Image (tube, coloured by chain):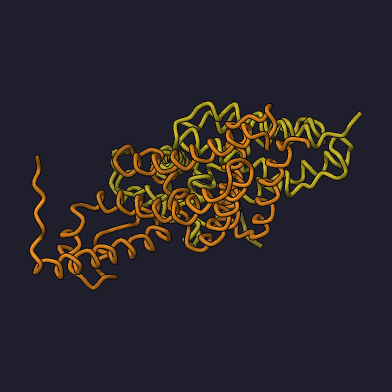
Chain colours: A yellow, B orange
């Protein structure tokens, strides 16, 4: 049995300071990764932005890869908190699915200036096996599974037609979000925000049960 | 008036050799860019693969950026030759549009192992103004304009419905191709090839004129 002892009081200050510094490094890294990509994250740049030494950064994150993995995890925690968790307050079925999609689109549109770590990371790491790729693919799959489950529940409760194919619906909706990111960020065509919203709504509507 | 003189015969051999070396460098660079991205192209790696010195590479391409731009141009020339030009042999309207989409999908599927320079480049360079980004966006826009024109012609000749919206149709089709690339390369889900084909066909079918 492991005996848990109370930590000595004099450590608390240092620990709090350490946790705050770690959180600040993660915050700066998230910003950098959004604009420069996860591959653009270097300990040197972060140290410069934080006005810390490189070894100061390494005291909190053992390696560049560990930092990249933690950035993906933190990004996913924020994504879950802003998109997935609020949608769970809606009843199962179309209301929950629709709320997930609305919040997802809102977060995508909010991030069109900075860039999405998942979408950019998918291209950066598609040919690079390793811990960062695994963490990215894992996060994206958790979100896709949540969307699939919401579609299946909407079929089960009768909001969507029985003939509706969850894998096809997920493929189409996810593709429209990728299209939005591509057109607005790369081609500088903000008109695609409306086209993406229309396209997603169309997929929902054509799979809706007839009353 | 500029007087064009015949080049001396003794130069031809050297010129041919130079052109062949340039083409070989471009070929190696295209392969590298497909797997590592345009940002992954370095003169050092290319020199190593070509068993040439770095200055030997610089004799053909003045800078890394010039080489990246030439890679985009060469990729686009090949794309035009394999996708766009054969489709022009089909009559205007749905036959030509359908052939463009079929050949495009075939080239995407063929390149799923190596990676697509346009799709990867869109993410790599979305936040990097400069000559490479301009060349990439320009190539993508030429292809999108060709697709739009084919859709408009199909409406004009009566193959597609008058109510059909070319911008929405283009957004949806392009999104499905991005979704295919994402799912197969990043998530390793080859089942999405079929989902992409079904989705594109569905967009065509629902916009088809009723006989």
Percent coordinates x, y for residue B193 in the rendering: 64, 56
Determine the residue positioned at 77% across, 41% down. A150
Determine the residue positioned at 58% across, 42% down. B92
Q: Residue furthest bottom?
A: B51
Q: Which is more toward the observer, B204 or A101?
A: B204
Which quadrant of the figure contains the N terminus of chain B?
top left
Classify A35 as above or below B32. Answer: above
Q: Which is more toward the observer, B44 or A191?
A: A191
Determine the residue positioned at 10% across, 60% down. B7
Percent coordinates x, y for residue A129 in the rendering: 49, 63
Counting labels gives: 0
Percent coordinates x, y for residue A141 in the rendering: 64, 51
Residue A38 showing in the rendered view: yes
Percent coordinates x, y for residue A106 in the rendering: 60, 28
Quarter of the figure with residue A46: top left
B135 left or right of B58? Answer: right
Q: Residue furthest right?
A: A211
Determine the residue positioned at 15% across, 70% down. B13
Quarter of the figure with residue A48: top left
Q: Which is more toward the observer, A110 or A18?
A: A110
A53 left or right of B37? Answer: left
């Amino acid at each position: 049995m492991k005996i848990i002892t109370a930590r000595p009081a004099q450590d608390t200050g240092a620990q709090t300071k350490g946790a705050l510094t770690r959180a600040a490094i993660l915050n700066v890294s998230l910003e950098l990764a959004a604009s420069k990509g996860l591959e653009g994250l270097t300990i040197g740049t972060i140290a410069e932005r934080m006005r810390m030494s490189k070894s100061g950064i390494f005291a909190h994150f053992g390696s560049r890869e560990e930092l990249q993995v933690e950035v993906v995890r933190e990004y996913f925690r924020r994504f879950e908190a802003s998109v997935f968790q609020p949608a769970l307050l809606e009843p199962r079925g179309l209301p929950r699915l629709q709320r997930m999609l609305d919040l997802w689109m809102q977060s995508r549109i909010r991030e069109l200036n900075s860039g999405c770590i998942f979408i950019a990371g998918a291209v950066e790491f598609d040919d690079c096996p390793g811990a960062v790729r695994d963490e990215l693919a894992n996060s994206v799959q958790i979100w896709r599974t949540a969307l699939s489950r919401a579609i299946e529940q909407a079929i089960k409760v009768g909001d969507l037609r029985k003939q509706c194919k969850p894998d096809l619906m997920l493929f189409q909706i996810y593709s429209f979000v990728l299209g939005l990111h591509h057109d607005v960020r790369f081609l500088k065509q903000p008109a695609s925000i409306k086209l993406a919203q229309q396209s997603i709504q169309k997929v929902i509507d054509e799979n809706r049960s007839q009353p």
